[in-house]
Image (spheres, grey):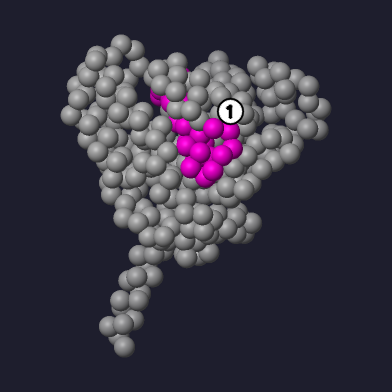
């Protein structure tokens, strides 16, 4: 399915007291998330409503920079991305095929705009979790594109209720729209919480912590960063990665890891590091697609002129 993408400016509402106009503005944005059949056109009108009703005192006024790339239309080039790991490249290719097969990008775009997050940063996490397959599930009870559990879904619901006073009515499982909505809400929650807790981080390092948190939980992330701060070391992913050990997982606030065997913890450490590594590779692969497409287009033009 082909569709037209447009560039949309996104602003985020600051926590704390809000005027009547800002409350109305947020409720307008919330209606987008709660509506089961909202189109891109409706999304545009809702955000225009936010701009017209909200003052600069209640908004960060920061534009979320979007790549504005239609990855679905570039899926045919996915097999040509450069990656030293063939398995990772093949998985990226499968995921891009699923992005097109299940017509997911309009929904990803919609909720990226709604939550003020970047498509090119969310898709790598979704590839890691399910290869963008809505039918994926695990024996542990995680379902769908983002492999959300009941607990993760509920935590995202609770976060938005407490922080913004709105019930997003996120569903555990459900159809592809429900899955993307809950997965991206959880991503936005995790990203926002880590950014506020560690405001000095660069975007790439912050994003790596978000991926780390997805696979390991908040406890190990916070403990790793705390240890670096005590040693006076920079909070960059290379240093954080060095801190991820079986001992860190066992010492974290997670009761689950305290009960794991040493061999299971060692395996989990490898999984965490690979998870972040692959997510970063997938992000790089997404950035390659427009370049590959442009090169192919230029070559075709040059070849047609030569013939």
Residue 188 shown in magenta: yes
Is any atom of residue 237 visible in this view?
no
Quarter-wise, where is residue 41 in the image?
top left
Residue shown at 81% from the left, 27% from the top: 261
In the figure, is residue 28 to the left or right of 97? Answer: left
How many badges with numbers are in the image? 1
Q: Position of 270 compared to 161: left or right?
A: right
Q: Which is nearer the eye, 248 or 68?
A: 68
> Above or below — where is 118 with respect to 85?
above
Q: Residue 280 versus residue 152: which sits nearer the camera?
A: 152
Where's residue 186, x and y in %?
50, 30
Could you tell me which residue is drawn at 51 percent across and 34 percent down? 182
Of the 4 image quadrants, the one containing the C terminus is bottom left
Note whether 164 is above or below 96 in the view shown. Answer: above
Q: Where is residue 95 in the image (x, y as percent from the top left)?
A: 55, 54
Residue at screen point 35% across, 48% down: 67
Residue 17 in percent (x, y) is at 30, 11
Main secondary structure of the magenta stretch: helix
Looking at this view, name the residue that lies furthest to the bottom: 307
Q: Is residue 176 visible?
A: yes
The quarter holding residue 277 reads top right
* Badge 1: residue crowd in 10 Å (few <14, some 14–19, many ≥20): some
Q: Mark 1 points at which residue?
A: 152
Where does the magenta region start and end? 171-200
Nearer to us in this view, 28 or 274: 28
| Mark 1 element type | helix
85 displayed left or right of 284: right
Confirm whether the magenta stretch covers residue 103: no
Q: In the image as oriented, which residue stretches furthest toward the top?
A: 17
* Residue 118 in the image, given as x and y percentages of width and height: 40, 40
Residue at 43% over, 45% down:
107
- Quadrant (top left/top right/bottom left/bottom right) for the N terminus: bottom left
């Amino acid at each position: 399915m082909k569709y037209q993408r447009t560039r949309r400016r996104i602003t985020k509402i600051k926590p704390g007291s809000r005027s009547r106009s800002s409350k109305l503005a947020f409720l307008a944005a919330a209606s987008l998330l709660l509506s089961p059949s909202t189109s891109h056109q409706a999304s545009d009108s809702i955000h225009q409503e936010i701009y017209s009703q909200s003052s600069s005192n209640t908004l960060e006024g920061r534009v979320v920079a979007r790549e504005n790339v239609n990855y679905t239309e570039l899926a045919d080039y996915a097999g040509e991305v450069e990656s030293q790991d063939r398995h990772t490249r093949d998985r990226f290719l499968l995921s891009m095929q699923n992005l097109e097969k299940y017509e997911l990008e309009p929904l990803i775009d919609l909720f990226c705009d709604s939550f003020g997050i970047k498509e090119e940063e969310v898709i790598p996490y979704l590839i890691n979790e399910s290869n963008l397959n809505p039918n994926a599930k695990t024996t542990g009870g995680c379902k769908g594109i983002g492999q959300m559990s009941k607990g993760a879904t509920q935590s995202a619901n609770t976060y938005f209720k407490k922080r913004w006073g709105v019930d997003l009515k996120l569903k555990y499982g459900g159809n592809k729209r429900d899955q993307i909505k809950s997965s991206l809400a959880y991503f936005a929650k995790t990203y926002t919480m880590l950014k506020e807790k560690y405001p000095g981080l660069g975007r790439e390092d912050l994003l790596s912590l978000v991926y780390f948190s997805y696979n390991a939980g908040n406890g190990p992330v916070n403990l790793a960063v705390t240890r670096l701060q005590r040693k006076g070391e920079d909070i960059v992913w290379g240093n954080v990665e060095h801190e991820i050990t079986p001992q860190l997982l066992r010492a974290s606030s997670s009761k689950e890891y305290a009960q794991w065997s040493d061999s299971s913890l060692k395996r989990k450490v490898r999984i965490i590091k690979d998870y972040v590594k692959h997510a970063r590779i997938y992000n790089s692969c997404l950035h390659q697609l427009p370049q590959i497409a442009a090169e192919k287009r230029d070559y075709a033009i040059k070849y047609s002129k030569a013939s």
